[in-house]
Image: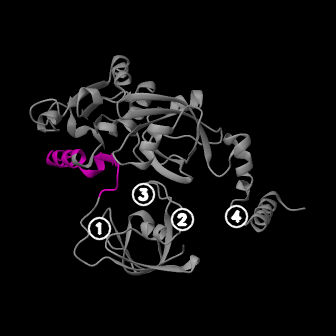
Amino acid sequence: MLAKQPQSKALHWLGRQLFNTNKPETFLDPLVEQINPMWIQEYTPARVEQVIQDTSDTKTLVLKPAGRWPGFEAGQHVNICVEIDGVRRQRTFSLSSSPILWQETGRINLTIKRLPGGLVTNWIHDHLETGAVIGLGDAFGDFRIPEPVQPVLFIAGGSGITPILSQLETMAAQDYRAPVTLLYFVRTGQDIIAREKLEALTRRYSALTLEIIPTHEGATPRFLNDRDLDSVPGLTARQVYLCGPKGLMDLAGDLLAARGIGENDIHSTFFSAPAADLGDAPLGGEVQFANSDLAASSEGDASLLDIAEASGLNPRHGCRMGICHQCSCRKTSGTVINRLTGKASGPGEETIQLCISIPRGPVSLDL
């Protein structure tokens, strides 16, 4: 009689041979989806239980994932999958609720702002309704509450408040005993996301100091400045968390560096991948997809993920920002440039992330 683990491996092998797929458990998904979409095995399904209009361009989805979803930590992201015109689309969003809500009710919140020209965010705002089922990936990210307990400064802009909402609710529930300050920048008072939740937090969480700063209600724009940071007691002893548009994060980084606050005390998360100076060396080259027996040529700063998709391949990916590592792939030869850091890889074998790697000359991949 086969031992349990070898037997499982044997069944998996048999399934692959019979169903021509690396995930035999998903073979019946098309039929199962018609009976109960919450039984699908290809991804973790999550039912939309409520859609809340936060602002004119922001909605919160209250989701109930299938019981097998492993949960998350405050400040993390998650990939969701929706089908638009017959094509499955993945995007990354921050969880805006506390893990305690999920532990107690099995529900999570995603707060999503409509992006001008955004395919998925516009579809969610215009078409996603209560009762629908979407796909949910495992949570990821290191934008987490500091341990051990330390004073914290949050600087958020616009929808950058979403992971910070998750952190603040968790800190309040855990009675996080250190000073916490939030500087929240919004265009106008009509653009405050989760206003009622933030006001409720300030009433019940005495460690929290909240300042909401409209940037475009006066004659001239009002941005983060030295006076804002001077108003934060014990600034140099704080862990600083940044989330918002790139302009705000760059400005905050410069002002904090001028006060001697080092990179180890600054934590940030991005809406889109920041671009480093890639230098003047020519980019692009021939890319060999060894496992697929394909080759493609590229010029300029197209990522290996973009090149693979343009070649008809569909490699696993998630955030497209270098955060989730789902697109990690083995490079067997050639040099790539990391678009986040501007640094070149070695010429030999190593694991790279397709979404942030740009070929510089010929490159071969196990894909």
Q: Residue at x 69, y 45 (%)?
A: 33
Q: Amino acid at mark 4?
A: Thr
Mark 1 secondary-structure assignment: loop
Kindly identify which residue carries mark 2: 314
Answer with mark 2 or mark 1, whichever residue precedes in sequence. 2
Task: Locate residue 353, reporting x and y percent.
Answer: 44, 65
Kindly identify which residue carries mark 4: 21
Quadrant location of the N terminus in the rendered image? bottom right
Task: Locate residue 311, reporting x and y percent.
Answer: 49, 72
- Seen in the image, is 110 located left or right of residue 251? right
Q: Amino acid at mark 3?
A: Arg
Q: Is 269 part of what is drawn in magenta?
A: yes
Kindly identify which residue carries mark 3: 320
Answer with mark 3 or mark 4, whichever residue precedes in sequence. 4
Q: Are marks 2 and 1 in contact (CB under 8 Å)?
A: no
Q: Callout 1: 10 Å neighbours few (<14), some, many (20+)?
A: some
* Of labels 3 and 1, the one closer to you: 3
Query: What range is drawn magenta here?
Result: 248-274
Which residue reaches farthest left?
219
Answer with mark 3 or mark 1, whichever residue precedes in sequence. 3
Mark 2 secondary-structure assignment: loop
Kindly identify which residue carries mark 1: 342
Task: Locate residue 270, reporting x and y percent.
Answer: 34, 49
